[in-house]
Amino acid sequence: LTTDIRQFRCLLVRQLVVERLSRPDKDGPAATGAPCAAECDAALAIARRVGDAVIEAVPAVREALEGDLQAALDGDPAAQSRAEIVLCYPGFRAIAMWRLANILWRQGATLIARILTEQAHARSGIDLHPGASIASGLFIDHGTGVVVGETAVIGAGVRLYQGVTVGARSLGRGASRAKRHPTLEDGVVVYANATILGGDTIIGRGAVIGGNAWVTSSVPAGGRLRMQDDADPSRGGPAG
């Protein structure tokens, strides 16, 4: 490992140990007082495993971000260079933070994952839950007010504009393990301030959702949905 990667891993492991030992839930050492030596050893072992998993995933994250960067270049005629997107585009920065947080989330380091995405949320106005599934090639244009929920599935080459919500219907705590958020298949475009809700809602490949639309049922592949469309799938309205 290079020096920079070693330092990053050490920092990550320290933070993971702190998270593990300070969890206030019923399973965390903090619930029973000061952690014992065995709990400290267990926390360190878990943190090292997660740290190794994150380092191993760096090449895949870099590859996915290359796809996100290219999507921004292809999707925004105002973009002058790759450097401009990396340094200036809030959507790209939010996605980059999400891709790291998602690895942590899948490894069980959920608190740190949430901290990372909430920092990106505070800076960009883009709220991407670390538990969501997002393929490469996502372009979030402008970005302010975009929300993607925990169980959402976002396919490759999807484009979201400002104010888009990929959310859940109002559900109680009992539904926390269910798929509560929509699926957007490859190549979907969702224009500004559209709201798409429900775990059983599938926006088909290449569909376009117009601005300010309220969508609670599926749209077929290649469909075009606008506010004035009715429920007839042949006119681009929701199906099912």
Image (cartoon, rainbow, N blue to C red):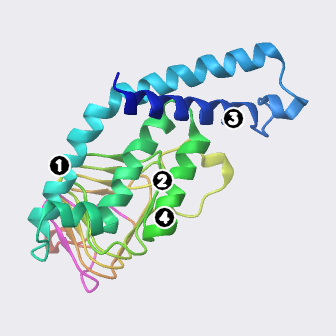
- Residue 121 is situated, as x and y percent measured from the top left of the image, at 48, 64
- Residue 240 is situated, as x and y percent measured from the top left of the image, at 31, 59
Which residues are drawn in magenta? 217-230
Three-letter amino acid code at the position of disc 2: His
Look at 44% across and 22% down and name the residue there: 52
Q: Secondary structure at mark 3?
A: helix
Structural distance between the alpha carbons of marks 1 and 4: 21 Å
**Dot 1 and dot 3 residues touching (CB under 8 Å):** no
Considering depth in this image, is 178 or 24 the residue closer to the camera? 24
Three-letter amino acid code at the position of disc 4: His
> Disc number at residue 148?
none
Three-letter amino acid code at the position of disc 1: Gly
Q: Identify the residue under disc 3.
A: 18
Q: Identify the residue under disc 4.
A: 121
Q: Earlier in the sequence, mark 1 or mark 4?
A: 1
Look at 50% across and 38% down and name the residue there: 105
Q: Identify the residue under disc 1.
A: 67
Q: Secondary structure at mark 2?
A: loop
Residue 39: name its quadrant. top right
Residue 191: name its quadrant. bottom left
